[in-house]
Amino acid sequence: MSISTLTSREFNRDASKAKRIAEDGPVFITDRGKPAHVLLTVEEYERITNKGVSIVELLAMPDADDVEFEAPRLDKPLYRPADLS
């Protein structure tokens, strides 16, 4: 993995080049010499954000009826009586 830097002007001139470079690692895009944005592939973004599949996404899937889901049982009461002494 390599880290690359492009100026905003270079990025605007050749976005395809930036996308090709991003295949090898993050591309920092600078604005007036300071990092302003980072270009990543979707795979790299998902890897670093540890994005898992949520229950909402599973239920929205066409084959959601094939997904086995059993909610965990609650082993403690939902509330405790308040001690007003």
Image (cartoon, rainbow, N blue to C red):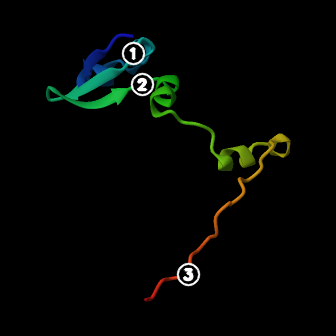
Q: Nearer the viewer, residue 77 or 64?
A: 77
Quadrant holding the C terminus: bottom left
Say left or right for 5 vs 84.
Answer: left
At a point 81% along the width and 43% down the height, the residue shown is 68
User: Which numbered disc flags the more N-terminal residue, 3 or 1?
Assistant: 1
Determine whether the residue tagged by mark 1 lies in a helix, strand or loop: loop
Which numbered disc, 3 or 1, marks the residue closer to the eye?
3
Look at label 1 and name its amino acid. Answer: Gly
Q: Residue at x 77, y 50 (%)?
A: 70
Task: Find disc 2 in the rendering and name its residue.
Answer: 40
Q: So how many labels did they put on this image?
A: 3
Q: Of the residues shown, which amino acid type is indicated by label 3?
A: Pro
Quote the CA–CA distance across marks 2 and 3. 52 Å
**Residue at image mark 1:** 25
Q: Residue furthest front?
A: 85
Q: Nearer the viewer, residue 4 or 79?
A: 79
Between discs 2 and 1, the one toward the N terminus = 1
Q: Which residue is mark 3?
A: 81
Dots 2, 3 in contact, CB < 8 A: no
**Which quarter shows the N terminus?**
top left
Percent across and percent down for residue 67 are: 80, 42
- Please state which amino acid type lies under the numbered disc 2: Leu
| Residue 55 position within the rendered picture, expressed as x and y whole percent measured from the top left | 67, 48
Of the numbered discs 2 and 3, the one sitting upstream in the chain is 2
**Is 9 on the left or on the right of 15, as rendered?**
left
Q: Secondary structure at mark 3?
A: loop
On residue 13, the disc is: none
Name the residue located 31 percent from the left edge and 25 percent from the top edge: 12
